[in-house]
Amino acid sequence: MKDPATMEQALEPTADGAWVLVDDGCDALRESDRETRFTVSNGFLATRASRAINQSQQRTAPPSTYVAGLFDTRDTERPVPELIPGPDWVQVRVSLPGGQLVQHFGPGPSHPLTLDMRRGLLLTECRLVEGAAVSLRLRLLRLASQDQRSLGLQLLHLETEKGEAEITLEASMDGFDSDLTSERLENEFGVWRTHLSGKGLAMAAAVALRIDGQNIPPTSLAPFRWTWTWKTRPGQVVCFDRIVALSRSDARDQDPGERARDDLDGAREKSWRSVVQKHETAWSNRWSRSDVKVEGDGTAQKALRFAVYHLNSAANPEDPRVSIGARALTGADYRGHVFWDTEIFLLPFYILTWPEAARSLLMFRFHTLDGARAKAADRGWRGAFYAWESTDTGLETTPEQVVGPDRQIVDILTGAQEQHISADVAYAVWQYWQATGDDEFLIAAGAEILLETGRFWSSRAQLEADGLHHIRGVIGPDEYHETIDDNAFTNVMARRNIRRALEVTALLRERWPDQWAALSGRLGLVEVELEHWRSVADAMATGLDSDTGLFEQFTGYFDLEDVDLSAYAGRSVPMDVVLGRERTQRSQVIKQADVVALLALLPEEFPGKTGAANFRYYEPRCGHGSSLSTAMHGLVAARLGDTEMALDYFHRTAAIDLADTKVAIGGGIHIAAQGGLWMMTVFGFAGLSLRSDGVALAPHLPRNWSSLDFSMDWRGRQLTINISQADHRLHATLQAGEPMILTLHGRAHKLSLDQALVADLGGPAPK
């Protein structure tokens, strides 16, 4: 990217409207939603789009800044670790001797926000006035560096439109409260520590202010508070920049201060221009590997850019000790905890566009393996039972009770019963290795995860008189039904987990016998146990009705009350609120994709027409009480060729975070829904599947999508795919790597650097 010569150039957004998201309003009821949607983040440091100028001290919106991995326990009576907010480092106050200038809310745009997704920037502007006498135009830029994740940058351009007055500008840092204890506090440097977990946080800052090009020193200085006072006049231009560097440490004997100082010194030496230029270059590189282009549907294009922007903003490949929470770093809902969302809804994007980030996220699961082992042992099982909600320790952090939608206290059983999490992690491990061929990861970490989760399921499933192994007392993805037996999703995923563990056993023995000997010896794995695993997998109860081809979601599901959800189409609350918890549990109403999720993840378990039969049965029974649900349904509908239904699910998923409808997003972006949009597009409409010898495509584009373009990685290769309905052809180009096989509708084609592929799409016409 070109180095911005002036601050005015840096403040100009990308001209192409498909790359920018704009909100012209200023509605107090939607303020926290706007702050979420326009967050800038880099996977380590995130800053919500809070108003930086003359922000009220009595602000009620969520905190502005989050640092990945900064967990502590606030409530010792119900000790659930949560993500602790960091410093609100962007605050600026502009005032006259009589008080702060007033932000003007006149007709038209009053406080527009612009998210430049291409450049990873938040841009905003406003006018500050004192009656009719003084008017200042203020423009701001904010970023969290994609190049050096410890850095945050704020630029401020202040132009006097009319009036002469004495102006005071105060730049400060707010937001530290009882969550952190100060260890050191200097004018431009501080170190704090969490109370119980002992994590350290350091911040170093540098500021500069220029009036008409001349550097002006502060008139007063205090810890993280700089003040300038000057006489303004029409046409005067004031430029302010602030660079901060933050660092986290995870133990009481670690000092994060030196890293923060060093990072700031390096950035200050090169100026804010270098920070912007390197940040934009890093974003350009990310987009070259992950952009998705849709022709013919501008709404879908904007939604996909928004999804990919937040996905690229959420990951930090440099830190395998943290993962991505249910709201990423855009808000504090779910206390920043990590769920199955990461492995099932996010990992596919990273695996195929950013393998380094995917590897780091899976290494988080490896580093938390001891916590998963402890959870299994506490319940009398072997192997690794992963936490349903996890922080950085791997210990179970699911709260025991919450207040339900009806304001009643509800016992939370997911931490004990939503056991499919172990199979979900194993699924992601295998998918990563299959797509990347990263043998080093498999040997060092992936194999151990597969073996210990396979061991868990072989311990968990019990042989009964019918000759089958049963898994009783669980919760599947459909959380409306608790303490159920033989959930099809759980059991089939568990069976696949065990079989992958056995496959990796054979692979290690054949290719890396020394590593197998060391690992099996350390884990105490002997042949008699492996034989038991085979018997469990071969005789796992799945609920499959061989006559109809339907999987019964769990034992007894088909006998429950069949509620016609079409009669409740206009509802504004989830179905468990409409029907009440007890009736919902006695009904076939499903919270989110369950058997449909199994069909999305393991389509090979549904031969012939059984996939369509299961989808037709379960789709009308799902109330979509979770933001995870519509994407899975859209993915499956697209694969089955029902592009009209799939596109409806696509836009419903996009609306979760982009539309100001019934879903409040003040607590953070639904990052799994964003991953689901990408999955729906690439695995659904493009029909991508991974094979041992390459990749396969079976496209079913919506009628109004004239073309779809995306990039992907596969085993060290980079390729671009164009699916054009205009000429009914697929164009595939290998950008880097060795020749490979691309299969289109079952027909294999060779792809190499000097041999691009142009092939007739074939297959049925879009519905």
Image (cartoon, rainbow, N blue to C red):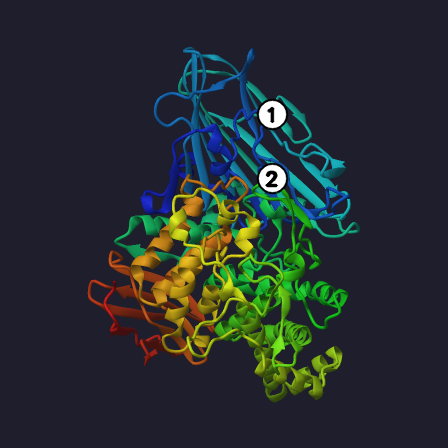
The image quadrant of residue 677 is: bottom left
Q: Which residue is mark 2?
A: 407
Q: Is residue 152 above or below residue 383?
A: above
Horizontal side of residue 112 vs 381, given as left or right = left
Most foreground residue, 734 or 741: 741
Secondary element at tag 2: loop
Mark carried by residue 599: none
Horizontal side of residue 504 vs 548, given as left or right = right
Quadrant where the C terminus is found in the figure: bottom left
| Position in image of residue 225 (x %, y %) | 64, 28
The image quadrant of residue 524 is: bottom right
Q: Which residue is at 61% across, 55% downward?
A: 338
Secondary element at tag 1: loop
Most foreground residue, 644 or 9: 644
Most foreground residue, 347 or 101: 347
Identified by mark 2, the residue type is Arg
Q: Earlier in the sequence, mark 1 or mark 2?
A: 1
Q: Which residue is mark 1?
A: 58
Horizontal side of residue 59 vs 563, given as left or right = right
Horizontal side of residue 393 vs 286, given as left or right = right
Q: Which residue is at 69% across, 88% downward?
A: 527
| Position in image of residue 19 (x %, y %) | 36, 47
Disc 1 packing (10 Å; few <14; some 14–19; many ≥20): few
Q: Is residue 35 above or below residue 365?
A: above
| Position in image of residue 428 (x %, y %) | 54, 68
Mark 1 vs 2: CB contact within 8 A: no
Residue 312 visible in this rendered orientation of the protein:
no
**Numbered circles on residues, count:** 2
Identified by mark 1, the residue type is Gln
